[in-house]
Amino acid sequence: MASGTPEAEGIQVTREPGPNELRDPMTRAELKRASVWFGLGIAIALVVLLIQPLLIIFGGLVFASMLDGGVRLLGRVLPIPRGLRLLIVVLLVLGFILGTFYLTGVQIAEQANQLRDTLEIQGNRVASWISSLGLMPGRSDLAGMAQQALGSVGRLTSAVGTVLGAGASLVMIMAIGLFVAMEPRIYERGLQWLVPIEARDHVSLVIGRMARILRVLLAGRLLGMLFEGALTWILLWVAGVPMALLLGIITGILAFIPNIGAFISGVLMVSVGFSAGADTGLWAIIIYFSVQTFDGYVLIPIVAKRTVDLPPALTLSSQILASALFGVMGLALADPMVAMIKVALESEAERAAQRQDGQRRFRWRLGHREPGEPPLPVGAEPQGDA
């Protein structure tokens, strides 16, 4: 044994790779696994901390889908460049909003003040009646409960809790949506660069399906909003219910949020109706149930055939969770979130089914038997596709 070596002096040296040796396959596997879990924890923490900006970005994508749907619809009749079609859509939307408020702005402002006073009076009457029955605490207790409920609102909803925060969020959503609608291909290409080349086909397919489902879902929502708002306004005006125009506008806006929006508009409608008398209140109840019944049994099934059909229980559950976690903005965006998640899960299930079917065909070509399949006869050769 050569002198000057550890073995010559009786010193034992461990020759196996140590824990700090990255060349060891086991160490690399453990490090990769730990990195995945560590990265997942960081991602969850970032989502929690940045949930408000993420919701604003998602709202901008939803608004971009609405603009893109209008651009595509206009392209069927006007073969002009996309930029000009987008400009026409934006001008039409702005013209409709400004024209509505210009023609009915004074009336809407007067009815808004009247609606606030009416709801306050009706709320006091209902609270006094329930308190007289002993089913609700007194007024001082109610005030304390209200302050406690308002004080328990989470930090996530503080940005949209004020008029200034809501206005700033709306401006950012519209700006993001407009920029994305102007050049959607740039952002689609950027998303594709974030995934490996071998997975880009599947990711591009999923993104395209999500965009299509989002467009048709929002088109159905806009159609339902227009129908419910206009029909509610006309019927309330014919029945003599006060503030019919404002109630119709509120009903149309709240129709964007299924289930919960209809309930809120119904409460407002019935409260205003009974403020003008028992007969008017009964007419308000009849109009509310008539509009919702026609919308639920006629309009929504027709729209759902060409859009995404979301189960009512799933929609309501997602709205409750989104409102509890993300506040008002989460409540408004719960439906598009669920629709996109549904598309992603369906696409992944389709991909898994295709992969499983391919494996079965491969095993069949090699002569492998499926579980429960009888064995081949003696001398028989496995056959493949012709």
Image (cartoon, grey):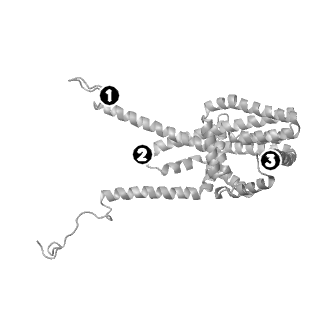
Residue at 44 percent across and 56 percent down: it is: 37
Residue 372 bears which disc, if any? 1
Marks 1/2: CA–CA distance: 35 Å
Nearer the camera: disc 1 or disc 2: 1
Q: Earlier in the sequence, mark 3 or mark 1?
A: 3
**Disc 3 and disc 2 in contact, CB within 8 angstroms:** no
- Residue beneath label 2, please? 198
Nearer the camera: disc 3 or disc 1: 3
Figure quadrant of the N terminus: bottom left
- Residue beneath label 3, please? 131
Residue at 87 percent across and 33 percent down: it is: 279
Mark 3 neighbour class, 10 Å CA radius: few under 14, some 14 to 19, many 20 or more: some
Seen from this angle, which residue lies furthest left? 1
Figure quadrant of the C terminus: top left
Mark 2 neighbour class, 10 Å CA radius: few under 14, some 14 to 19, many 20 or more: few
Nearer the camera: disc 3 or disc 2: 3
Camera sees residue 364: yes
Residue at 43 percent across and 35 percent down: it is: 353
- What type is the residue that disc 2 sits on? Glu
Camera sees residue 179: no
Q: Picture coordinates of residue 22 (x, y %)?
A: 33, 62
Q: Picture coordinates of residue 180 (x, y %)?
A: 61, 49
